[in-house]
Amino acid sequence: MSRNAGGRNRKGLWLAAKVKKTIEKQGLLKEGDKVLVACSGGADSTALLDILLKLRRDFSVQLALAHFNHKLRRNADKDEEFVHGLARTYGLPLYVKRENIRAYAGEHGLNIEEAGRTRRYEFLRAIAAKIGASKIATGHTMTDQAETFLLRLLRGSGPQGLAGIAPAIDGLIIRPLLEVERPDVERHLKARGLRCRTDESNFDRRYLRNRIRLELIPFLEREFEPRIVPHLSRLAAIIREEDDWLERLAEEGARLALRSRNGRTLLDACVLSSLPPGLARRVVRIFLSRAKGSLRRITFRDVESVRSLAERKEIHLPGRLTLRREKDQIFLEPPPRPQVRYEYVWNGKKNLAVRELSLQFSGTKITGCKKGDLRFDNDRRAYLDAAKLRFPLLVRNRRDGDRYRPFGAPGRKKLKEIMRARGIPASERDRQPVFLSGDRIVWVLGLPVAEEFKVARRTKEVFVIEKTT
């Protein structure tokens, strides 16, 4: 690029005037801002740099350049060299990062586009913080907005996805070219005599976005509506504004439906069911975002499954996550704890310490008590007919095939099914202590005693097992 082309050529400045109006309307810049310009060397970012150079005196801003080399293409290093040339030409500081994005994507289970976007923005934010930049400018155009809208529409996105590319994010990332179509960018570069780099991967029709750019949008312009790009851009803006309003309503709903307990985020299923479906879905998304840390890989079907989750049921979400509903509270199950195996022989006299669970149990015999005097609590103690027990008792964790008949139940069932029906979390089912007399289950912590060992009218002596820690 010649210095004359970048510095003294006064042609093509009509686009700068248009971008200036966008910046003023959207409040993208303020006096004294330091702007980090994300520059790939392509048409959009090269035009963005040229326009910001023209406008920097109007807004009294400083500029710096940043380039992220994804190491994906044969010409990636030449693109980097080109951006170095821009920095030298305009006397701007340049910050560069090189990373093998293909390897990063494979290591983290991401597609290449997602991995590149994630690492690129992490780099840009880090450099902005390092140099004290108050804005990061990217070269997204109105055509990018239309492509993004169609891409997300074809993938089944909801309103939040169709809202598309925002003019500004977090008051930091700005898109000054978002009201400019790509052909205008190309005309500007030609009028200004500016060169740029061409990304050959933009013509690879294996990628859906490229087919939208190269085939679908031209087809729609040719056969249906020449102004489809600005129409879709306006629609995205309308959806974005309405989505912002609905999101504020959802935050109000979330304040009623969400609470924190013992470091966990809980969703009140009763409050959720009282909300209109559209608002309830948004509250679920807020809940999942807080509980999971992000909404990555969460689909509409996942959100609906949370809305319809029944009491004492659980669902599995992407990322090996499990949600459960207990006592009308929906929460994220903790990751499965390491499996433990233990087995103790207990004479019922001394306290029993189950070291693997950090639990301790005491055994006491009571005579002459009335059933009405007993304080039943399946989570802490069991009352058993001492005459029916054979000591020593065996205490171990659940095993496949374990069956028993809980007090008041019509017959014997698999212990695993009883635990599930009683709401014992899956992560706890193989850890709960099981007490046996001979080969018969007498009690399982958290469940009723066995019918055949219950305290009855003719019971003369009661054996009490109680959890003490």
Image: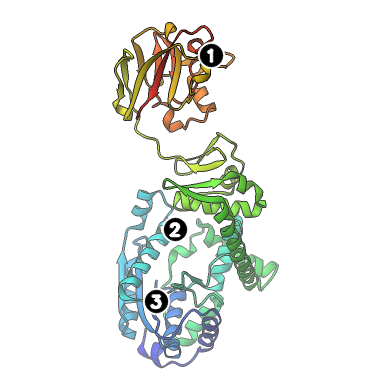
Q: Nearer the viewer, residue 152 or 208?
A: 152
Q: Is residue 154 above or below residue 20?
A: above
Give the label on residue 134, or none: 3
* Separation (CA) of disc 3 from disc 1: 68 Å
**Mark 3 near mark 1, Cβ–Cβ under 8 Å?**
no
- In this image, 69 relative to 411: left or right? left
The answer to whether residue 249 shows anywhere in this view is yes
- In this image, 369 relative to 106: left or right? right
Q: Position of residue 339 (x, y in %)?
A: 35, 29
For this orientation, the residue located farthest to the right is 224
Closer to the chain start, of discs 1 and 2, is 2
**Mark 2 sits on what residue?**
113
Q: Residues within 10 Å of mark 3 (few under 14, many from 20)?
A: some
Q: Quarter-wise, where is residue 2 in the image? A: bottom left
- In this image, 349 relative to 35: left or right? left
Q: Quarter-wise, where is residue 134 in the image? A: bottom left
Q: Quadrant of the C terminus?
A: top left
**Mark 1 sits on what residue?**
412
Q: Which residue type carries mark 2?
A: Glu
Q: How many marks?
A: 3
Q: Which residue type carries mark 1?
A: Arg
Q: Is residue 94 above or below residue 297?
A: below
Mark 2 residue element: helix
* Separation (CA) of disc 3 from disc 2: 26 Å
Closer to the chain start, of discs 3 and 1, is 3
Q: Position of residue 381 (x, y in %)?
A: 43, 23
Q: Nearer the viewer, residue 100 or 274?
A: 274
Mark 1 residue element: loop
Closer to the chain start, of discs 3 and 2, is 2
